[in-house]
Image (cartoon, rainbow, N blue to C red):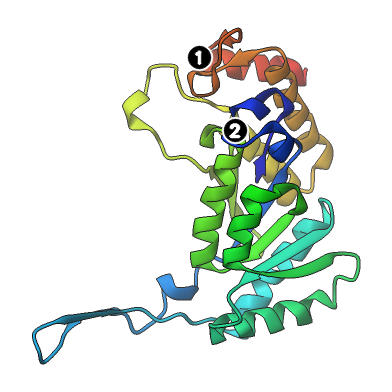
Amino acid sequence: PARVYPALADASSLKREVVDGIDIMVVRELVGGIYFGQPKGVEKLSDGTERGFNTLVYTTPEIERIARVAFETAGKRSGRVCSVDKANVLESTELWRRVVTEVHKDYPDVELVHMYVDNCAMQLVRWPRQFDVIVTTNLFGDILSDESAMLTGSIGMLPSASLSADKGMYEPVHGSAPDIAGQDKANPIAAILSVAMMLKYTFNEEQAAGDIERAVVTALDSGARTPDIHTEGMKLVGTKEMGRIVAEAIK
């Protein structure tokens, strides 16, 4: 999820009044779509030029599965789902829209809206607070998740989850940053919040997850900042010290 903490709202590249209070969960389909569709490749044509091609394919079960994840996730949040597609020009995402609409009938307490991907990309920087859960295809989710991540001001703050039917892999959105390994510079908050996500979405431990999330807020409100989010007047701390401050806040 992409969440802007009040203490870090000024770190965003957008105005505080635009990003203040945003909390967006992007639910991205990970195992289908154009990245894995067949056929794909590059072939040489008879005139000596080349042609590259990929195939965008989605089946009803694939769409149903990710739609249910989105609706169930929204049920634990603010109860709003925005399904993002390009149904006006792509038949595969016209199917996506129809299937998501059908699955929505099983979740009457969750609000559903549909949005074209180009409009969604614009709305994320125009009025991001309108979004709660965004569900979309592999390709569109790849792009929109990075866009929403940067609304927060630092990718070092963002946890993520890769979910199957009964298991999940939770990890920070950011990479391993080998260039700062062992230097006590990395921001541990994304890893800490990944644990909170695990407790909430795999183990249904809402209270424990909330305790961790509130501890992160307390740590940030205290002025503690790792180098990636440090600004003048704040307390510069390392990885270990930030972790200690969050742990103390949980106690």
Q: Mark 2 points at which residue?
A: 12
Q: Which residue is drawn at 63% across and 85% down?
A: 95
| Residue at the left extreme of this rendering | 48
Q: Nearer the viewer, mark 2 or mark 1?
A: 2
Residue 133 location in percent, x, y?
Answer: 72, 57
200, above or below 187, in the image: below
Residue closest to the eye, 111 or 124: 124
188 left or right, relative to 51: right
Q: What element carries label 1?
A: loop
Q: Where is residue 101 in the image (x, y as percent from the top left)?
A: 76, 79
Left or right: residue 104 compared with residue 233: right
Tell me where residue 134 appears, x and y as whole percent.
68, 60
Q: What is the crowding at mark 1: few (fewer than 14 residues within 10 Å), some, or many (at least 20)?
A: some
Tell me the quarter of the picture where residue 214 sits: top right
Identify the residue shown where x is 62% and y is 84%. Answer: 94
Q: Could you say which is closer to the camera, residue 72 or residue 129?
A: 129
Tell me the kind of residue under disc 1. Answer: Gly
Q: Where is residue 39 in the image (x, y as percent from the top left)?
A: 34, 84
Tell me which numbered mark, 2 or 1, is placed earlier along the sequence: 2
User: Residue furthest toward the bottom?
Assistant: 46
Determine whether, in the image, residue 110 is placed left or right of residue 38: right
From mark 2 to mark 1, how far is it between C-alphas? 21 Å
Determine crowd level at label 2: few under 14, some 14-19, many 20+ residues with C-alpha closer than 10 A. Answer: some
Determine whether label 2 and label 1 are within 8 Å by CB: no
Of the residues shown, which amino acid type is indicated by label 2?
Answer: Ser
Q: In this view, does 222 lie to the left or right of 143?
A: right
| Residue pointed to by mark 1 | 238
